[in-house]
Image (cartoon, helix red, strand yellow):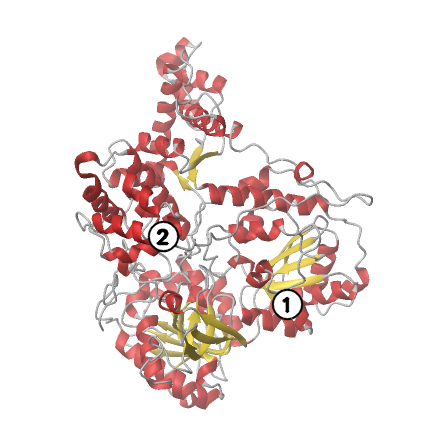
Amino acid sequence: MTALPGETPGTVGTDTPQDTVSPPDTGAEGSAHADAPEAPGATEPPGDAAGAVEPAAEVSGTEVSGTDVAAAEDRPAVVPDAETGRADGDGDGEGAPAEESAGSPEADAVTADGTAEAPAVPELSEAQAELAAQRELRERIEKRKAEKTAPIAAGTGLSGTAAELLAAVRAVESGEKSGTAFFDSPAPAPAARRPEPAATAAQPPRASVPAAAPTPQAASPEALDAVRAVLVAGGAPEALGRPAVGVLGEQAAELLRTDPWQLLAVPGVRPEQADGFARALLGDGCGPDDGRRTAALVGWLLERAALQGHTALDAGAVRAALAERAVGDPDAAVRNAVEEGVALVFQEGDDLEPDDAEAADGEGDEEGAADGAGLAEDADREPAQVLLGLDRYALAEESLADGLARLVNACEKAADWAEAAAAAPSPSAAELIRTTAAAGLVAHSGGEAARAEPAALIAAARGLGLRALGATHSEDGRRRLAVAVGDPDTAVTLAGLLSGAQGPGRDEDGALALDLLVVLDAPQLDVENAAVLVEALADGARLVLSGDPGVLGSAGAGRVFADVLAARACPQVVSRTPDPGPIGELVSGIGIGELHQVDAPGKEVVIVPVRDAGEAVHRTVQLVADSVPRAFSIPAEETQVITVGHGGAAGTRALNEALKQRLNPGPGRFGGFDPGDRVVHVPAPGRAVPGVVRSADAEGLRLDCGGVPVVVPQERVESSVRHGWALSAHQAAGMRWPAAVVVLPGDAAQALSRPWVYTAFGRGERHLSVVHGVDQALPHAVAHIPAQERTTRLRPLLEALPTPDAAS
């Protein structure tokens, strides 16, 4: 198959971009562009170019040698032992370094000096990390001693908040002050920002929060012409003009002329390409330690980290990544980025107070100074972690923490919902109703079957005359929730609610006209959307965050649901309702790290072993087009194929091409699409909306997305619409189909993890087929590769806020 620009043939494009720096032992399940369909340049881990694998191992369900599900024997399969079946490797889930591509087709054409990518930042062992921490402690003490007699300069070109920020950074680095004194002080009390409601006074105007995603600016012809001229002068393609103006604004040409590294803000452009562009414009007037370059690199690293879900990065990891990119003084580069306002600095954890530092230095204790006993004693204390973050995520996390505390404290707790709880359809639903009656914020967790409990809560609240509503991640989830509640007006999508296209609208104060909001699929809620949502809730409203902690995390930055659970900032209700049937039993086992053997007498779970990627594609097409419709009367349009990534011989691109040829062949006269094609539309990062092509005209491509007509403008079709017979697991999160076919080609083994398998296997309601070519990598991933942590600040912010009424 011909490789697309930025694609490495023969590899699997995973859902998670790997081109970023992360703290040791951290990562992310998703990325902000995980749901962007087949974005050219998606990172692809190395794999077997030929797709060859060892014979597939049997897993739970019914194994068939071909794809005739109806003729499969009614026998359980043997599950490989989780311990003896582990694959080679350290089991940390990181795998081999990812093979990187250049991003977008436009970015590939940017002139760059050198093509070799800097190696990834090596991870430290626990012993190495401890030694590094002790060295950092000693250096901080020495700095404090050296700077005791001199005041800390705040910079000559700064004033106001910027000068205070610089002074704070230098104070933290010198050890004179604890970082918490500047950055981790508790947020203002809710009453200071939003007074409590009073019977005789109207609510004050609501504070504003930045939109969850910045809207690209419209480009004027003059601005486009000017920026294209600068791009051509620097050897970059003119095609970058429109996205450059969209990101940098009308002054993009002037900005790029004076600071060529601003080109890194354009999606898909890489540092080596921006370096080549800068050299073409500035000649000898630039170097690797140019402040413009280092500031842009810090911002780029933080943006790339956000694609993996981090809202902040360890400062040491950022410095190491800068050193890998030929920055001679990473410490100065970080300070410069903070001074320029590119990044904010935060300190997490306890640091040495001045008196403690003096004791550690041995001052006032000659014996301690002689033998270093003071230092040895205090070196056991865990050093503070210095984090760098972008202001947009810092603001979102702080606003969200403040808003959640407001909901906890402002809610009226004396509501009597006892009768509604007594009439609940299950004990777990009754517990959720009672808990919600007594709390302004509740976290509810459970599997697919547990979604009936929030539905019962919404119905009970509406029965009490309250304005109650449920919001889901997808249109499919909205329909299922509406059916469970029994009222189509009780369910909306989260995107529709925030945009105003769905839901009750706003009251005179700008708040959502709701008394209770239940957010299902809460793990898919990123920090920016969560901040906007919580800000839109009035004082006294109740919020329930409900979801399955085992699924893949949000496509955007943050881990809101996991942080709320970990901080124990509110009462938590854990569902006791198990997922039914063989698929439910299989998925429940995966959630606790076990690949159980399950009996599937009705062929609910079928395993199709394959030898290579080519056979995987062939068997997948047979399953969707023939076997599943014949055995279960499930038509092809109700069967969803899910695979590990977009690239490779059995990625979404290859599978969609093969499925189109079989199910809806055509010339692709509408920009590669024909009427009847299944597609996925990505209107914004993190949102994947399945649809069907209906027609096209001068206005654009016309889609039917779950009964909602959508017109995609012509200039957006190439970047936001792809065929959708096959999706990634991130794109499929929050949705279910009558049948799911999960494809595991041999070159996908390194990309598997427990959350990925859990999410993918749980998308089928009645039937699950697993096209299995990864041998022992599947049980190994389930048993040994759990969800990887994201670096965020929401949990400590929640723990620091006063929430006296929250359950411990």
Q: Considering depth in this image, is 256 or 751 the residue closer to the camera?
A: 256
Residue at 36%, 40% in the rendered image: 126
Name the one closer to the observer, 763 or 201: 201
Q: Residue 149 is drawn in which quadrant?
A: top left
Q: Is the C-beta separation of discs 1 and 2 under 8 Å?
A: no
Q: Residues within 10 Å of mark 2 (few under 14, many from 20)?
A: some
Residue ID at (48%, 23%)? 177
Q: In this view of the protein, can residue 743 be seen by the observer?
A: yes
User: Could you say whether the residue bearing mark 2 is in a helix, strand or loop?
Assistant: loop
Give the residue pinned by disc 2. 92
Q: Secondary structure at mark 1?
A: strand
Q: Which residue is mark 1?
A: 491
User: Can residue 100 be seen by looking at this rendering?
Assistant: no
Quadrant showing the C terminus: top right
Q: Label 1: few (<14), some or many (≥20) within 10 Å?
A: many
Q: In the displayed structure, does residue 555 sit left or right of residue 239?
A: right
Residue 523: image location, x then y, percent: 53, 57
Q: Amino acid at mark 2?
A: Asp
Q: Which badge, 1 or 2, is on the more N-terminal residue? A: 2
Taking depth in this image into account, of 667 and 623 the one nearest to the observer is: 667
* The N terminus lies in quadrant: bottom left
Task: Answer above or below: position of 28 versus 152.
Answer: below
Q: CA distance from mark 1 to mark 2?
A: 40 Å
Say which of 273 and 801 sits in front: 273
